[in-house]
Image: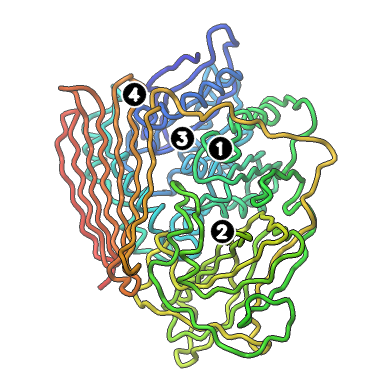
């Protein structure tokens, strides 16, 4: 068991003190250790610390000290946090690293490890230039919060980024602190400054001045970097972009996972703590690993249901396989008769594609019926896709307020339809996502676009069929367009609507055997063992309205051994032909403590395509405060 030194203040360059808990190896070990930093806004005392105790103790058992640090304006740290991905976080992680390196119990060697926002922090640390930083491990993070988290492919997210995260973070940020040295007035100042993050995002849907400085350049990373991500996470594409840009020693592991720790996944779980320790041992302590060297790239091949290990991605040079869109489906031949395929708007299209934190994709048949579908002949041999497919589309649109949603499916002989990967482009905000294209010709209704899918590693078996679907909405991943506009796809050689697949030979076998460490159990601490996540989907009798309900419930103990309960629920609804009816309603309740010493936070949010209403109530530590916000998004 590790020893915990509670509430150790770390002073930032502007005088703000951040609160940290230091986990030290047992007393029989050395007096000095390298330190692993975990810094995030998830409350080290009430939420993050209890949930990750097994991981933290795994690191201390391996001979590392661990410093868990609350972001400024969260947990028991001073300062305010009124926004996400703030520029000051880059300075803070630099100062945290250097202050910890100077501690008497530290060897002067520092690593940074984190999940989700903590993974973003780890990658920011890797670009910070901190002299004492030796290596980082980032799980489910990226260097670009605009395209990697908030507005993937140029459109504000809905289910995961707001329904599952931003609204819950308003409650976590407002939890009363426990540090004895923190002035109560500091918490009052925090409550006065806090605001719903999604209100700000809605005012900055393009990559404008607001986003400048919130991203980091992965090409400047000069420390060894381990990246762990999952094909079924919502924001894994950013991890692959970062991996491709890093010039330092690097490694990526991508499993068939949702957003979260690899230990707790239902399919192919792995022990990410063991992987991280091996990485840090090699690059922090200069301990050469035993056995064969770890491969640079470890990817799970969906469809084949096995791991592939290589030094590059893809493992073998890919060959572009071009399939033309035609009235008969997907064809290899270039001679396609001219034609037009209408893609009607249906705001409910997309609910079968999963929610990246809470639910894996379901059978896609429901969404296929709400899309234009192009299907190949039965495959007479396996088809291995490795990389990011691309589609060239010639379109006819009435205006640019249109979303182009493309998905690739695997149709089994029994008809079961599995999502392979998807792509998205909002015509009014194409890459590089700075807004409307310059001087668009409103009289010209024809457009040609190149749309990239998310990268994938997938094998379609012999006897299966490949399917492309096109729709004009991807609910509840994105807010449906208020225009309710569809489009037409032009076919024929003169228009060149073509799907390009990066294909590779049969799965690559390494010359030496290698296995990933399998997780012995889900790494959830007993103090947070009572956890549930649920997602349900309901439709009315004529399938024109859909309601997605989800949430999480956790009961456990804080680091102070107080009881804590968190209940977060959300409901997202829309109407197939009336996107203005789209609504999101959430409620988060957090209760900490026992009778007579209870601290409670309640956040209620309601959002539509036109605006946002949020209310916060905080009771505890002498505080009883209500705050309310109303933010119109559109005139």
Name the mark nearer the viewer: 2 or 4: 2
Upstream in sequence: badge 2 or badge 1: 1
Q: CA distance from mark 4 to mark 3?
A: 20 Å
Figure check: 371 above or below 4: below
Q: Nearer the viewer, mark 4 or mark 3?
A: 4
The 10 Å Cα crowd at callout 1, few under 14, some 14 to 19, many 20 or more, is: many
User: Is residue 36 visible from the viewing direction of this image?
Assistant: yes
Report the residue marked by disc 3: 39
Percent across and percent down for residue 457 are 67, 54
User: How many circles with numbers are drawn on the protein?
Assistant: 4
Q: In which quadrant of the rendered image does the C terminus lie? A: bottom left
Q: Could you tell me which secondary element the residue under label 4 belongs to?
A: strand
Of all residues, the one furthest to the front in this rendering is 414
- Mark 1 vs mark 4, CA separation in Å: 23 Å
- Which numbered disc, 2 or 1, marks the residue closer to the eye? 2
Residue annotated with mark 2? 416
Residue on which disc 4 sits? 557
Q: Is residue 208 visible?
A: no
Q: Say which residue appears at 42% left-offset and 34% top-offset.
A: 12
| Distance between the alpha carbons at the discs numbered 1 and 3 | 19 Å
Q: Residue furthest bottom?
A: 443
Q: Residue at x 19, y 38 (%)?
A: 618
Residue 431 is drawn in which quadrant?
bottom right
Considering only order in the chain, which callout, 4 or 2, is on the residue closer to the N terminus? 2
Element type where label 1 sits in the image? helix
């Amino acid at each position: 068991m590790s020893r915990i030194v509670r509430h150790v203040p770390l002073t930032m360059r502007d005088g703000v003190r951040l609160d940290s808990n230091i986990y030290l190896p047992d007393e029989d070990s050395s007096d000095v250790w390298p330190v692993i930093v975990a810094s995030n806004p998830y409350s080290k005392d009430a939420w993050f610390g209890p949930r990750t105790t097994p991981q933290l103790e795994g690191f201390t058992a391996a001979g590392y000290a661990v410093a868990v640090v609350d972001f400024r304006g969260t947990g028991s740290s001073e300062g305010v946090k009124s926004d996400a991905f703030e520029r000051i976080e880059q300075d803070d992680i630099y100062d945290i690293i250097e202050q910890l390196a100077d501690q008497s119990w530290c060897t002067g060697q520092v690593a940074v490890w984190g999940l989700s926002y903590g993974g973003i922090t780890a990658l920011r640390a890797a670009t910070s230039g901190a002299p004492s930083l030796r290596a980082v491990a980032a799980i489910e993070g990226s260097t670009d919060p605009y395209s990697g988290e908030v507005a993937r492919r140029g459109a504000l997210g809905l289910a995961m980024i707001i329904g599952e995260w931003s609204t819950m973070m308003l409650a976590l940020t407002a939890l009363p602190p426990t540090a004895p040295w923190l002035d109560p007035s500091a918490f009052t100042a925090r409550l006065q400054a806090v605001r719903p993050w999604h209100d700000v995002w809605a005012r900055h849907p393009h990559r404008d001045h607001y986003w400048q400085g919130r991203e980091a350049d992965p090409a400047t990373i000069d420390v060894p970097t381990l990246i762990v991500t999952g094909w079924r996470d919502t924001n894994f594409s950013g991890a692959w972009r970062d991996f491709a840009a890093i010039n330092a020693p690097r490694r990526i592991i991508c499993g068939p996972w949702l957003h979260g720790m690899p230990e707790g996944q239902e399919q192919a779980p792995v022990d990410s703590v063991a992987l991280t320790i091996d990485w840090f041992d090699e690059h922090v302590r200069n301990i050469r690993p035993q056995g064969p060297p770890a491969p640079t790239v470890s990817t799970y091949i969906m469809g084949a249901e096995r791991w592939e290990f290589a030094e590059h991605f893809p493992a073998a040079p890919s060959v572009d396989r071009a399939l033309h869109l035609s009235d008969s489906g997907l064809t290899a031949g270039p001679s396609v008769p001219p034609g037009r395929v209408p893609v009607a708007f249906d705001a409910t299209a997309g609910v079968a594609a999963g929610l990246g934190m809470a639910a894996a994709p379901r059978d896609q048949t429901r969404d296929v019926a709400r899309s234009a579908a192009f299907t190949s002949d039965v495959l007479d041999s396996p088809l291995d896709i490795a990389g990011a497919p691309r589609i060239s589309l010639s379109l006819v649109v009435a205006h640019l307020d249109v979303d182009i949603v493309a998905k690739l499916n695997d149709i089994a002989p029994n008809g079961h339809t599995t999502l392979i990967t998807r792509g998205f482009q909002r015509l009014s905000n194409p890459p590089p996502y700075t807004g409307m294209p310059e001087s668009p010709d409103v009289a010209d209704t024809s457009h040609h676009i190149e749309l990239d899918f998310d990268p994938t590693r997938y094998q379609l078996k012999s006897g299966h069929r490949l399917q492309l679907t096109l729709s004009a909405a991807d609910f509840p991943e994105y807010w449906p367009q208020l225009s309710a506009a569809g489009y037409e796809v032009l076919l024929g050689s003169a228009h060149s609507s073509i799907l390009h697949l990066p294909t590779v030979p049969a799965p690559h076998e390494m010359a030496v055997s290698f296995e990933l460490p399998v997780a012995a159990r889900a790494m959830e601490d007993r103090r947070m063992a009572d956890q549930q996540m649920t997602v349900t989907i309901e439709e009315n009798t004529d399938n024109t309205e859909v309601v997605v309900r989800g949430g999480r419930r956790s009961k456990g103990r804080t680091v102070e051994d107080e009881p804590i309960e968190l209940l977060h629920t959300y409901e997202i609804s829309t109407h197939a032909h009336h996107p203005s009816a789209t609504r999101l309603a959430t409620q988060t309740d957090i209760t900490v403590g026992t009778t007579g010493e209870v601290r409670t936070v309640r956040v209620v949010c309601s959002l539509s395509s036109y605006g946002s209403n949020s209310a916060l109530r905080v009771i505890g530590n002498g505080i009883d405060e209500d705050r309310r916000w109303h933010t119109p998004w559109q005139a």
